[in-house]
Amino acid sequence: MNLSGRLENLVSHEILVATSIAGEERDVPGGILAEVGEDYILVKTEDEEKGGFAITGAQWFVRLAAVMHIIHMADCKKCAVEEVAG
């Protein structure tokens, strides 16, 4: 299974993404994985006022070719809800 196929299982889950563009490390604010394409992901962020990690809420389209790593948060709210619902 390829990366985009595995990521489809994490849609609606909280993730962190770090990218490397032109030798510089650039991080996408933590957010919710909203969509997975063949060569991109869409991360929806919330501003701090709404409990998120970004200055403003936004949709981040990230090319998978630029991704260094994707972290599925250990305290992901969706996972906690799914675990309780059992």
Image (cartoon, helix red, strand yellow):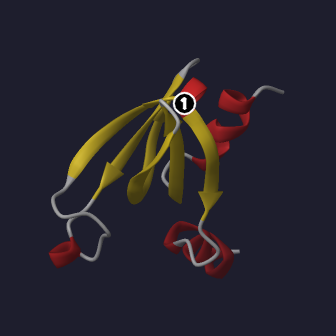
Question: Residue 17, position in %: x, y?
Answer: 52, 50
- Residue at position x 59%, y 77% in the image: 80
Q: Is residue 11 above or below residue 2?
A: below
Q: Is residue 19 above or below residue 22?
A: below
* Image quadrant containing the C terminus: bottom right
- Residue at position x 32%, y 69% in the image: 53
Helix, strand or loop for disc 1 = helix
Is residue 13 in view from this perspective?
Answer: no
Residue at the limit of the structure toward the front, as seen here: 23
The residue labelled by disc 1 is 66
Report the amino acid beneath label 1: Ala
Residue at the limit of the structure toward the top, as seen here: 38
Left or right side of 66 for 48 = left
- Residue at position x 59%, y 68% in the image: 73
Question: Residue 66, position in %: x, y?
Answer: 54, 30
Q: Is residue 72 above or below residue 1?
A: below
| Viewer-nearest residue: 33 or 53 | 53
